[in-house]
Amino acid sequence: MKKIIPPFSKETAEAKVQAAENAWNSTNPEKVSLAYTIDSEWRNRDNFFKGREAIVEFLTNKWSKELHYKLKKELWSYTDNKISVRFEYEWQDATTKQWFRTHGNEHWEFNSEGLMQKRDMSANDIKIKVSERKF
C-alpha cells in the first residue's frame, strides 16, 4: 500500500482514517503503534503519555478489558497535516459483561513521513443492551 503523507486531500484524509480504523479493529497493539512516531504524544481521556512503548502498553491494557471491540471512524475535517475524526465503538466489559458504546472525537497531527506525532482523544461511554448494538 502506498504511504499516505501530508499535505492531505479529502481522498488521502479519508484513506488515512480508514487505515486507522482497520488497524484499531485488529486489536493488535504492536500493529497499531507503527502508525505513530517513536515519541508520539497522546491524550486519551485523562491519560497523557508519550512514545510507542507506552502506546503498546496502553492498548494491551485497553483490549484486555474491552472485549469484542468494534470501531467505526468518520472523517470530520482536515488541513495540511492534521485530521479530526468522530468515532463510535462498541465493547463488552471483561469484568461485568456490560456492553458499552463509546462516542468521541480525535484530533491528529502528522509529521512529513505520515506518522502521527500527536493524538488528542475525548470520549464518553454509554451503557447499551445487547439488542442496541450497531456493529
Image (spheres, grey):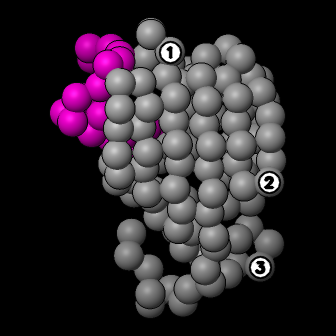
Residue type highlighted by circle 1: Asn
- The image quarter containing residue 11 is top left
Name the quarter where the C terminus is drawn: bottom left
Camera-nearest residue between 120 and 15: 120
| Circle 2/circle 3 CB separation < 8 Å | no
Q: Secondary structure at mark 3?
A: loop
Query: Residue, x 44% and y 31% (percent of image)?
Result: 82
The answer to whether 83 is drawn above or below residue 99 in the figure is: above
Badge 2 marks a residue whose secondary structure is loop
Does the magenta-highlighted stretch encompass residue 21? yes
Q: Residue at x 70, y 78 (%)?
A: 97
Name of the residue lying farthest toward the top:
113
Task: Between label 1 and label 3, give the one nearer the viewer.
Answer: 1
Circle 3 sits on which residue?
96
Q: Quadrant of residue 54?
A: top right
Q: On residue 46, which mark appears?
A: 2
Region in magenta: 1-23
Which of pointers 1 and 2 lies earlier in the amino acid sequence? 2
